[in-house]
Amino acid sequence: MPASWPREYRAAADFVAAAYRPQHDEAGLETIEKAADRVLEETGIRFLDDPQTIDVLKQAGGVATGDVVRLDGAELRRIIRRHAPAKFLLRGRSSARDTPVGGGATPIFAPIYGAPNVVLDDGTRVAGSRQIYGELVAAAHAAPGLTNTGQMICVMEDVPEDRRPLEMLLAHLSRSDKPFMGNIASPAAAEAVIDLTAAAVGRPASAGECNLLHLINATPPLTYWPNPLKCLRAIALKGEASMVSSYMMMGATSPVTVAGALIQGYAEVLAGLALAQLWRPGAPVVMGILAYPFDMRRMLPDFGDPASQLVQFYAAELGRRLGVPVRGDGAITSAKIDDAQSGAEGSRVLSAAVASGASFILHASGWLEQGRTVSLAKFRRDAAALVEPGHGKPADLPTPLDHGIEMEIRGRLARS
Amino acid sequence: MPASWPREYRAAADFVAAAYRPQHDEAGLETIEKAADRVLEETGIRFLDDPQTIDVLKQAGGVATGDVVRLDGAELRRIIRRHAPAKFLLRGRSSARDTPVGGGATPIFAPIYGAPNVVLDDGTRVAGSRQIYGELVAAAHAAPGLTNTGQMICVMEDVPEDRRPLEMLLAHLSRSDKPFMGNIASPAAAEAVIDLTAAAVGRPASAGECNLLHLINATPPLTYWPNPLKCLRAIALKGEASMVSSYMMMGATSPVTVAGALIQGYAEVLAGLALAQLWRPGAPVVMGILAYPFDMRRMLPDFGDPASQLVQFYAAELGRRLGVPVRGDGAITSAKIDDAQSGAEGSRVLSAAVASGASFILHASGWLEQGRTVSLAKFRRDAAALVEPGHGKPADLPTPLDHGIEMEIRGRLARS
């Protein structure tokens, strides 16, 4: 573009052109990797209250000072490239629902994760509940565009916190036979859900197969909290999958620039992905680097901002160079109702995720209001948009859940 | 994807995976080219009421039977590849607004083209008028995301048809100094607008430069009407640019399948692009193959359908193989109001166009209701979404139009 162009053209147009062509920018990707290596070496990552993590990183050459470990990025990449699978199979109770992750397979779409509030079809805004949760899982099962029923689609506000993992599990297992995501309330909860799900799936897992993908978040900037670290370890040791993600608010929890956020996020996930391999070489992982500009006037992230799409494109390429499947976000938006803003922002984010080659797309349906709300109507609209009109038919009713396993889960809930 | 997957998965997922990766499908692109060659050879293209076109095609090896000419697709490709520029410069009255087309340059965004109706900010629906037209051009000038003010943003229903080309020209020249699109009401109108615009731009055109891009539509299936053929000739002889487009309704004016539509559309535009080169070797051209499924129940096209995005991705690759810049569509939708459907459909189409590498994106702002309406509010929303928030500033007021040229246009209007 001519340097003589007015500045306002360049801001708009450079973005658009750059956003969709990062695959030709190997030099830029190397710059990001080298800068992340410098962050890892000079600043390091803080691993809160988990001595086992610090010990294993020291054995891999890390230099610990208190809970901060300075790391060799090139070594972390070697560990990941040597051990992490480029693709794996995520299995459902019905083998017809098994979904490959990575390796050029079709992206997997899962619903919104973590909404405390629900907007019902009459417009009422209510707290999430056990009953609504079951209905959301059933809706995710029925939707042909969703190939994973996710986890914590809404928060079960009417269920005590310690009972929620098994209540959600029961919903996912009884209302669907599609694969779903694991629980990370605690390592014990993760393990219980893993074991019960394995029993429900029934088929023994061959190499390259697992049943649950878990959302393991770094806490930007450059920190991992204890529970994700302990869950990551428990999950890897069980041979189940972790989606190691850095979810940054640009300008608040990361640098405000696209390049700066990519550097920080890459440093963070490099540590988490390598940790999974240190706990168990070959542990299935997905990499997520996601960044949304933080609006300092409203003190909220801007989920429709195109800078995020540029981050997504580069993240996908960083994952390709690392040899691991990559995460994308779905129809996410800052809009409070499902209006034109919601439609436009959601489709932009989703289109970028799909076009980037992401393998697992979270928040693909239902997200409203910065993710604080799941809308039943938007859930259906988003899910319908994932299907070519006229082709998708609602999924068959799920295979009934084995009675013994259902009784086992209900028994544990009764005793808790 | 496993063949054992339920059919409803495959319909959704095959599309998504295939849609965004056609660059790896050189074999598929060759199949489309060969099938188009067969259509051109066995069925041919109908050129209505324009003997000069038929004569020049016969000189290039075409076999005419009445107004149908059977053509050698390989020869048409040779003509286009030998002569058509891979990129050219589209100039505005201000050189700071000049925009390169093709060759990896940032895509150009132009507003909706051809809306008879306007929705005002108070929700009133009115017929397009001269006054509204001027306001729309001014809005396109001010919007940093729009780098071309287009043509016939709305229809001037209060101006006699024969005066509209110069009234629109006056609006584009006086309310903006960005490049805009040419007029195709008739060859004489096209030429008058070309000459007056050249005078207003002032700078002599070097090789690879021109001032106006014209929308030249085939009339699917496999037909060109007389006026586009005569305009194409007049425009090429003046050294100005033509965007040769096939805009198909899948199932109505083209085969219903993606592959079938691509074959027909490619055959149509191959003829038009080669014609431009036969009239003037080196004439700047843009290629457009666009197809939207036609809903037989509503008797209207479905502008949000993902099949169209697959067509766009393959069209971009066919253009790349031909060595010419490619057109895309912007925020188009079947929605009647600017709601979630409008936002989602528009962003999907626009994202696919940008991701495909399209060089000129028409209908980038304002489109509602199958293109029959331009909404002022959506015009601003769409234009704003093309700019990274916080970066775009409204364009400076346009350089004043040369008084002599304004008087010349007003004089011609007074005499008409």
Image (cartoon, coloured by chain):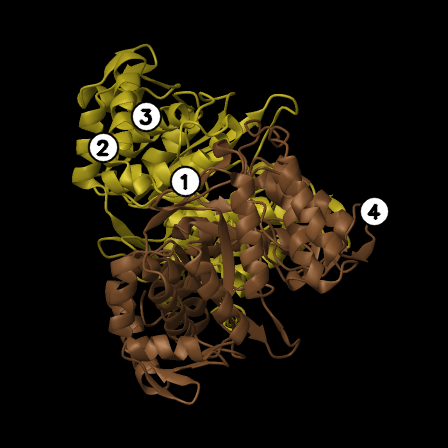
Chain colours: A brown, B yellow
Q: What residue type is disc 3 on?
A: Ala
Chain for disc number 1: B
Q: What residue type is disc 4 on?
A: Asp
Q: Which corner quadrant holds the C terminus of chain A? A: bottom right
Disc 4 designates what residue?
A122
Disc 3 designates what residue?
B267
Return the x and y of residue A205 as percentages of the image width and height.
41, 43
Disc 2 designates what residue?
B278
Q: Nearer the viewer, mark 2 or mark 4?
A: 4
Q: How far, Cα to Cα, is label 1 from label 3?
A: 26 Å
The one of B196 and B399 positioned closer to us in this rendering: B399
Mark 2 residue element: helix
Marks 4,3: beta carbons within 8 A = no
Are the residues under badges 2 and 4 in a single subunit? no
Left or right: B61 in relation to A89:
left
Q: Nearer the viewer, mark 3 or mark 2?
A: 3
Marks 1,4: beta carbons within 8 A = no
- The residue at the point 40 percent across, 53 percent down is A356
Chain for disc number 2: B
Q: Residues within 10 Å of mark 1 (few under 14, many from 20)?
A: some
Disc 1 designates what residue?
B17
Q: Tell me if residue B409 comes above or below residue B114 in the rendering.
A: below
Mark 2 or mark 1, earlier in chain: 1
Mark 4 residue element: loop
